[in-house]
Image: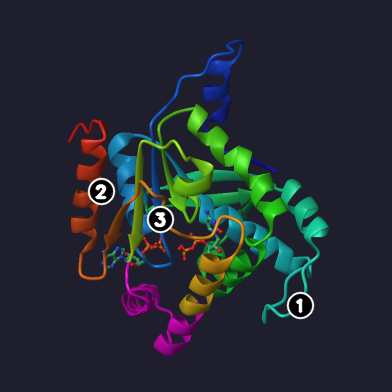
Amino acid sequence: MTVSTPDDSLLNSEDSGTTSFKRYPVICIDGPSGAGKGTVTWRLAQSLGYQLLDSGALYRIVGLKAFEAGLVSADAKRPIDEEALLQLTQSLDIVFVPNNESGRVDILVNGEAVGEQVRNETIGGYASQIAVFPKVRQALLELQQNMATRSGLVADGRDMGTVVFPDADVKVFLTASATARAERRVAQLLRAGQTADFEAILNTIKARDERDENRTTAPSKPAEDALVLDSSMLDADTVYELVKKQCQDKGIYFNS
Ligand SMILES: Nc1ncnc2c1ncn2[C@@H]1O[C@H](COP(=O)(O)OP(=O)(O)O)[C@@H](O)[C@H]1O
Ligand SMILES: Nc1ccn([C@@H]2O[C@H](COP(=O)(O)OP(=O)(O)O)[C@@H](O)[C@H]2O)c(=O)n1
């Protein structure tokens, strides 16, 4: 698998011929679904001019492609062939393109745009099924780490601060009650003109939390040196200001 951003050729050509590499700042935003990671990650990346790593999107793409290939089932009951999953993961060429309108990255897989469907709860469930496999996580590890060799990086996920960037400059574990997170998802779906069943969403979120927190490899948990922030009672602006303050305290400079 390869992952790139549109300006990679430029960045790589600057680096070519050198053996030393500059260490760029890394900010990790981990936490469960709906905690507000993507929102604060986007805003930080915009303010700082850093790249953004939406690691969940990588797992979502693998989950989607594995479902399309018949490797995972909707009810999560069928055993998964780890070797076939690894081969599929390695065959994917992923490009992230920041989208100012959605405040997320658009994704190209093997040259084709993947629609917003990849963000839905069903694909989130497939992602958490394939995310338990150590070989898949290993295949994704180095390419995630490589993203920090080109510029400053804000990385959003479950294991950014614990496994992928253990030496990161800033680590935040953003959480919120399952009820608050399900309410946010419902509001998000209604805003997008879709229907939303609160109980169904709450149950899916809880099932995904359970799988993510209890897997053996890279379970979702705060790094020992992470700032743990419960956003249940905080609006998105307050969360951003608190995370920004944490970054400043760790020596990261903001222009505004
Ligand atoms: N602190 C907050 N309070 C209320 N809603 C929020 C907050 N942060 C984000 N949101 C909203 O909640 C939804 C989920 O946020 P998102 O950033 O996608 O979470 P995550 O990336 O952790 O899954 C979005 O609709 C977002 O606008
Ligand atoms: N670093 C990461 C990121 C996501 N994932 C998996 O991918 C799923 C989707 O992640 P996501 O970050 O897109 O999900 P949301 O928090 O946006 O709902 C998670 O439930 C995890 O199972 C992971 O295992 N490790």
Vertical order, 37 against 152 (above or below): below
Indicate the quadrant containing the N terminus: top left, top right, bottom left or bottom right. top right
Q: Which residue is mark 3?
A: 222
Dot 2: element: helix
Relative horizontal placement of residue 209, taking residue 92 as reference (left or right): left
Q: Nearest the camera: 165 or 49?
A: 165
Task: Compare marks 2 and 3 and give the one earlier in the sequence.
Answer: 3
Q: Which residue is mark 2?
A: 243
Three-letter amino acid code of the residue under disc 1: Arg
> Which residue is painted at 33% across and 79% down in the image?
183
Task: Compare marks 1 and 2 and give the one earlier in the sequence.
Answer: 1
How many other residues sit within 10 Å of disc 3, few (<14), some (14-19) or many (≥20)? many
Three-letter amino acid code of the residue under disc 3: Pro
Give the magenta range. Answer: 176-204
Q: Which residue is mark 1?
A: 78
Relative horizontal placement of residue 170, taking residue 249 as reference (left or right): right
Dot 3: element: loop
Vertical order, 140 against 39 (above or below): above
How many other residues sit within 10 Å of disc 2, few (<14), some (14-19) or many (≥20)? many
Residue 245 in the image: state x and y as whole percent.
Answer: 19, 43
